[in-house]
Image (cartoon, rainbow, N blue to C red):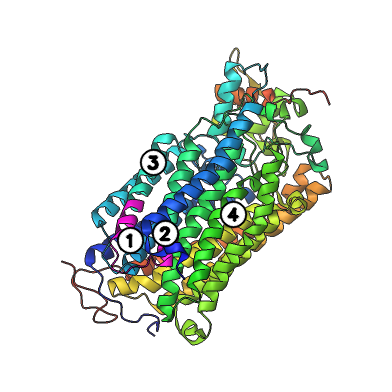
Amino acid sequence: MRDPGLVASASVDSATVRVTFEYLAWATVWLLVGTSAGLIASIKLHWPEFLPYAWISFGRLRPVHTNLVLFGWASLVLVGLALYVAARTSRVSLSNPGLARIALWLWNVALLGGVVTLLAGVNRGPQEYREWVWPLAVVLAAAVLIDGYVAYRTVAARTLPEVYVSNWYILGGFCYLPIIYVTSYLPFYQGGLGNTVIQGYYMHNAMGMWFTQLALGVSYYAIPRLLGRPVYSYALGVLGFWTNLLFYPLIGAHHFIFSPVAWWLQTTAILFSVGMMVPVWAGTGNLLLTFKGGGGVVRRSYALPFFVTGLIGYGLSSTQGTLEAFRSANIYWHFTNFTVGHSHATMYGFITFIAWGAVYGLVPRLTGHEPSPLAVGVHFWLALVGVLTYVIAISVAGVLQGFAWVAGQSFIVSVIEAEPMWLWRTIGGLLMIGSHVVFAANVWAMRPRAATAPAVTPDAVRSPA
Amino acid sequence: MSFGGLHTDHRAIVAAASIVFLVLTLVMAVLPGLREQALSAPAAVTPRGAEAERGRQIFMREGCGFCHTQFVRDLPMDRPYGRPSRPGDYAREDPPMLGTQRTGPDLADVGSRQPSETWHLIHLYDPRAVVPQSVMPAYRWYFVEKDQAGAGDAMVPVPADLAPRGKVVVAGPDAKALVSYLLSLKQPKVSP
């Protein structure tokens, strides 16, 4: 059955269509590679002799997994969607699709270089998500700056006076990430524990000031569009934008609570972790309230359930993050697998589900080709059951580890107790990867074809030139 | 609602967001970074020897720091790993590897806790030879299996049932360097 959210879209030029789709397709490739690396690493934790080769040992695969899912999958899919949203909400074509395509290839070069160097053991030590050697970081930064320039020029060329709230978040993200990234690679203040301060700032802000920004920017366009109704509150969206900007950067040090890093920095981080509840629930509430009265559309849509899941994931996982920051809870949870569960709840339960919702909601309007609703349903349930299995198993593992440590048991007790949960994590991971394969097939089904008859609505596509 | 005219001015949005974020980056990252950098540099630090320094590079190459912290907190559960870490402990570390996960035990003071070179070599060759329930990778690629040990070879006394049949295990230069780094991880004594 046709998705009722798929109402006729105004014609989109073919260059915008193609470059958007290329971002999504490459993102899908990196999703498959990156999560396969994660699965192999996961298996190694309960089967240490599995594939005992230097290049794919646990310590080398882990950064390959994290960097690919963060920069290869989540960044590329959201950049592709964000550029499209910037163009649509500004009622113009993408300002410079050629530049956007150059940026995409810079991303791909950096990502491929990242995979090869990390597998070869060439890295900057276990500095999470900035393990790449600096030449690759330069390429990635250039790609982000070019994409940001394209987004900015597109919004600047808008034919409406207002800058739609989506573009606040999107342009914001493109301003913040280069600042975060450059700050994390410049060495002048990173001697000794200076490095740790920057590590906390970097790994924290790269999440909330980049992925969250783009995901919310895309949501503020796609959800009202699919529901055919305006966003619940424009003002709440803007409030979320500013409070996120003011609170989020203050809380990076909550990754190093009880560390020798200055106590005031840790306390500020804990305090504003609570403050983060304002933008989080402003955003979640605002977007969920947009659904009010739209239950019928949601039930018949295959894209909107991804958004509902993603928004609930946003609210819950961010609240979980706040709780983890309290010193009393941190005693039990820090250093444990609980943190890994939180990372997956956010990057998968929130960011990835939002990205999927937007892909399924928007791409058929671009290309005129829909995937089979059954296949989308299979994707949804495999991914949801998979991530729930993963997050519950690994969170239980974290709690078991924390209690074993607090009880003063020998360290190996925490390994023995967590190991059955690691097997469950692999099972969850297998379901997740299964869903990615289905997703890849669906992306392929939605691909743009040269000069075909539009399948959705007569004005959904214009024949490529 | 007008939001002070910002909502129609993309330049103002970008400028305001960038400036606020730059200021917060300065206050929450760069300035505290400079301060901690100064605190982390005590007057007298003996640098590591060349072999231990090479071992540190191997430790980074293999991503050991993703599972092993070097960060003892002032909490009862951390007492087995040493005294609480101090900024000066990280003076010779670039980058300092405090870590975020303890899939394996903390290594801040492992050179004092487990000073046996032989134990570390066996453990790197086959962690399950010394800790049966361990899930650590075996770093066999840093060892050579020979028919007979040559002169000057560092033989690794792997238990017979885990050793390769009819061969002896000899530590390669990288295994020795890595162990030399691990043994160099000793928390300096501090006066209370």
Residue under the image location 59 percent in, 61 percent down: A345
How many C-alpha atoms fall within 10 Å of the one at disc 3: few (<14), some, or many (≥20)?
some
Residue under the image location 80 percent in, 41 percent down: B75
> Disc 2 residue type?
Ile
Decide: is A406 above or below A237: above
The residues tagged by marks 1 and 4 sit, at their Cα atoms, a distance apart of 26 Å
Decide: is A197 above or below A238: above
Contact, CB < 8 Å: mark 1 with mark 2?
yes
The residues tagged by marks 1 and 2 sit, at their Cα atoms, a distance apart of 10 Å
Residue A113: mark in rendering: 3
Q: Kindly state the secondary structure of the residue where label 2 is placed.
A: helix
Q: Which residue is mark 2?
A: A170
Tag 3 subunit: A
Check the image and name the residue furthest to the front: B4
Residue B187 in view in this figure = yes
How many C-alpha atoms fall within 10 Å of the one at disc 1: few (<14), some, or many (≥20)?
many
Tag 2 subunit: A
Task: Give the label, 1 or 3, closer to the camera.
Answer: 1
The residue closer to the viewer here, A155 or A95, is: A155
Q: Which residue is mark 4?
A: A247
The residue closer to the viewer here, A372 or A268, is: A268
> Disc 4 residue type?
Phe
Residue range (magenta): A148-169
The image quarter containing residue B123 is: top right
